Image (spheres, helix red, strand yellow):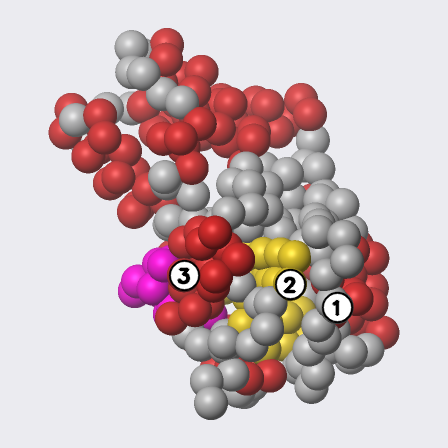
Amino acid sequence: MNNYFLPRYETTNKGDKMCKLYNIELVIFDMDGLLFDTERMTYRATKRIMNKKGYHYNLNKYIATMGYTKTDADTLKRKMFGKDLINSSLFQEINAEFQKELKTKGLVIKNGAVRLLEFLKEKKIVACVASSSNRKTIKRNLKRANLERFFSFYIGGDEIKKGKPAPDIFLKACDKNNTSVTNAIVLEDSTNGLMASKSANIKCIMVPDLIKSNKEMIKNSFAIVKDLNEVIKIIS
């Protein structure tokens, strides 16, 4: 039997039966939108610059690029808005706008993140980050948020050949920790991350951020929770 396809539940629905996961050795965290409230900041920065340059940009277009590596996301933007973006300084301007907002508003840790990480540390369950962001960004954000001490390692999108929705980054995380996919779980907020975990045959708990709970999440995830606090209830 394929262990991925186990009973699912959605904790946001009252009366749902609680399902638990046992023998978990590795918890793989996404970063943007999962650990940190950075997806909204990135969207706002991208929209301001794109609209300023005359491109019609909205939330649906941003969501379409979520979970991809920067290179893949930029390629998708070019398909959406034209090849003239190739020689444009637009991407640098968007990053500068994002950094300006980050400096002003700070890096916000998502609800339940610290509590979950403390729980995993207490239970001696390994935590790692596997993000489409590059390694340098992951290191900088974890240090800025004082969360480095909780993670045994991290893998960036610039360290793999194929980014999400390909399974490479999650399989690499399991290999690095010498953990079977049946003893790992992925925590994600994006559809691309969910599809990557499914392809890797690793159970995925979804914590919706900009993308709200939908049929695809219900069908392909082990569970959908409202925040990272609820992940604690699932892991035994």
* Rendering coords of residue 83 (x, y %): 14, 29
Say above or below: 41 vs 21.
Answer: above
Chain-order first, disc 2 or disc 3: 2
Q: What residue type is labelled 1?
A: Met
Residue 209 colored in magenta in the image? no
Q: Name the residue under label 2.
A: 9
Is residue 131 among the parts visible in the rendering? no
As rendered, which of 147 and 12 lies closer to the eye? 12
- In the picture of the structure, the residue carrying the numbered disc 3 is 195
Q: What element carries label 1?
A: loop
- Choose mark 3 or mark 1, whichever is in front: 1
Q: Can residue 90 be seen in this view?
A: yes
Residue 34 percent coordinates (x, y): 61, 49
In the displayed structure, would residue 49 be above or below residue 136? above
Q: Report the residue that reaches farthest toward the left.
A: 83
Q: Residues at badges 2 and 1 in contact (C-beta under 8 Å)?
A: yes
At horizontal 57% and vertical 22% (from top left) the residue drawn is 100
**Alpha carbons under labels 2 and 1: distance apart:** 7 Å
- At 16% from the left and 26% from the top, the residue drawn is 82
Prevailing SS of the magenta stretch: loop
Please indicate whether residue 117 sits to the left or right of residue 205 in the image: right
Between residue 24 and residue 205, name the one nearer to us.
Answer: 205
Label 3 – label 1 distance at C-alpha: 23 Å
Q: Where is residue 168 in the image (x, y as percent from the top left)?
A: 37, 70
**Residue 158 placed where, x, y %?**
38, 57
Region in magenta: 159-170
Which mark is drawn over residue 18? 1
Ranked by sequence position, the earlier of labels 2 and 1 is 2
Which is more foreground, mark 2 or mark 3? 2
Quarter holding the C terminus?
bottom right
